[in-house]
Image (cartoon, helix red, strand yellow):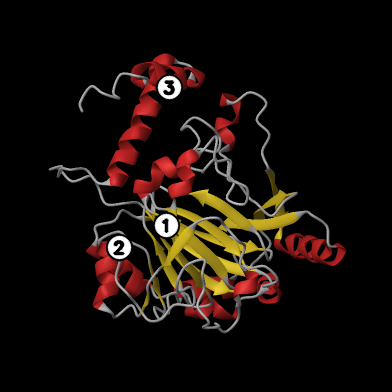
């Protein structure tokens, strides 16, 4: 990866003496693996373009992508965002493990670790403040697609985003359409555990600081994703705070890429890259907007050897096809084990 300006996360989990405005190392959770810094570069730096072309992460420090939104805080949003309903996740812990509600019937007795509730923005703010005041365990995390129900001031800010720059990024790489802009408002200390998405993502930080730890697609076997038919598909089964090395031995070999993003920073999260995101401890509320794009179409001529993310896509398709062919998602694992176990250890060596 290209080197950028000195990062506040130089040396990964072993941080340098450089103290960054707005946060300190004491606000970071401790994990048992090494990380390397994600480069921080100007969007005009040719190395930034090279990293995006290679589908590697980079923090862009000066895109002005969401400049009009840098004034957003809960007071401004409460006044301006409108009277629509917002999706708010509520958990009894700081971890918000994503789950697909449509896949819940595939797993007997599946119990989500969080629940989704629709509420007005003012209700969300009131509930969040009450939780902070009482010091309870309950945590809230608003995750809402920005749509046409928002108020006029928000629309004006949204239209003032640097669409010229981001549209150019999309066109240059032949990405598909923008699929959504997700507004994320989280309490301090909230964690979104490691997962990967099947879309390209520009992650634009608006308020507060978030630590982002990324892992490339070739670390798939170190991160043990749930099966495709499981509600937690695309999420790691490993608890980073208390890893079970007997169950997940390859996790010992995982190495991450890390950064802390603050207001105005834009992190490029490439498709199929794992990402673990946390709002800093004692750092106040965080506000982020995601820009999600479909990836470029599959090239007509496939080049070999395949890249790691292409292999992940193939594995996903095999699991999906087997699920359809067998008619029962629960039968996919036993069949794959029967196919592979003991057959390939020596056969091609």
Q: Is residue 193 left or right of residue 169?
A: right
Residue appearing at x 81%, y 61% in the figure:
131
Percent x, y of residue 61: 42, 79
Q: Secondary structure at mark 1?
A: strand
Residue appearing at x 39%, y 27% in the figure:
319
The vertical placement of 157 against 120, above or below, is below
- Asked if the residue at tag 1 contacts the one at tag 2, i.e. Cβ–Cβ closer than 8 Å, the answer is no
Look at mark 3 in the image and give the residue it sits on: 323
Rounded to the nearest angstrom, the CA distance separating label 2 from label 1 is: 10 Å
Look at mark 1 in the image and give the residue it sits on: 292
Is residue 101 visible in the rendered image? The answer is yes
Q: Is residue 213 left or right of residue 94?
A: left
- Asked if the residue at tag 1 contacts the one at tag 3, i.e. Cβ–Cβ closer than 8 Å, the answer is no
For the image, the number of numbered tags is 3
Q: Nearer the viewer, mark 3 or mark 1?
A: 3
Percent x, y of residue 158: 49, 71
Residue with the most extreme left position: 301
Rounded to the nearest angstrom, the CA distance separating label 2 from label 3 is: 34 Å
Q: Secondary structure at mark 3?
A: helix
Q: Does label 2 or label 3 sit earlier along the sequence? A: 2
Percent x, y of residue 143: 60, 56
Q: Secondary structure at mark 2?
A: helix
Name the mark on residue 226: none
Specify the quadrant that holds the N terminus. bottom left
Q: Does label 3 or label 1 sit earlier along the sequence? A: 1
Is residue 148 visible in the rendered image? The answer is no
Rounded to the nearest angstrom, the CA distance separating label 3 from label 1 is: 28 Å
Q: Camera-side residue: 304 or 61?
A: 304
Q: What crowding class fits label 2: few (fewer than 14 Cα within 10 Å), some (14-19), or many (20 or more)?
A: some
Look at mark 2 in the image and give the residue it sits on: 170
In the picture, residue 347 is in which quadrant? top left
């Amino acid at each position: 990866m290209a080197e950028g300006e000195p990062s506040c996360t130089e040396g990964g989990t072993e941080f340098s003496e450089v103290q960054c405005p707005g946060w300190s190392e004491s606000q970071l959770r401790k994990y048992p693996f090494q990380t390397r810094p994600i480069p921080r570069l100007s969007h005009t730096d040719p190395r930034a373009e090279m990293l995006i072309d290679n589908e590697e992460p980079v923090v862009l420090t000066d895109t002005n992508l969401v400049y009009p939104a840098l004034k957003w805080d809960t007071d401004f949003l409460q006044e301006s965002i409108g009277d629509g309903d917002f999706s708010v996740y509520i958990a009894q812990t700081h971890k918000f493990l994503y789950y697909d509600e449509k896949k819940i019937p595939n797993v007997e007795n599946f119990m989500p670790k969080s629940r989704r509730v629709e509420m007005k923005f003012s209700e969300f703010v009131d509930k969040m403040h009450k939780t902070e005041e009482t010091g309870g365990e309950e945590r809230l995390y608003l995750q809402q697609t920005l749509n046409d129900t928002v108020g006029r001031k928000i629309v004006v800010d949204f239209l003032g985003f640097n669409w010229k720059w981001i549209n150019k990024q999309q066109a240059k790489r032949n990405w598909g359409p923008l699929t959504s802009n997700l507004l994320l408002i989280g309490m301090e200390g909230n964690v979104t555990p490691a997962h990967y998405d099947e879309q390209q993502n520009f992650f634009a930080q608006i308020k507060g600081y978030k630590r982002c730890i990324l892992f490339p697609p070739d670390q798939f076997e170190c991160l043990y994703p749930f099966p495709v038919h499981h509600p937690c598909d695309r999420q790691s089964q490993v608890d980073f705070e208390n890893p079970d090395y007997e169950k997940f031995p390859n996790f010992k070999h995982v190495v991450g890429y890390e950064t802390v993003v603050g207001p105005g920073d834009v992190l490029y999260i490439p498709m199929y890259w794992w990402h673990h995101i946390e709002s800093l401890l004692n750092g106040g509320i965080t506000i982020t907007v995601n820009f999600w794009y479909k990836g470029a179409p599959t090239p007509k001529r496939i080049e070999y050897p395949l890249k790691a993310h292409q292999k992940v896509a193939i594995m996903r398709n095999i699991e999906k096809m087997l699920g359809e062919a067998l008619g029962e998602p629960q039968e996919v694992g036993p069949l794959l084990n029967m196919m592979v176990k003991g057959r390939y250890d020596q056969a091609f060596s």
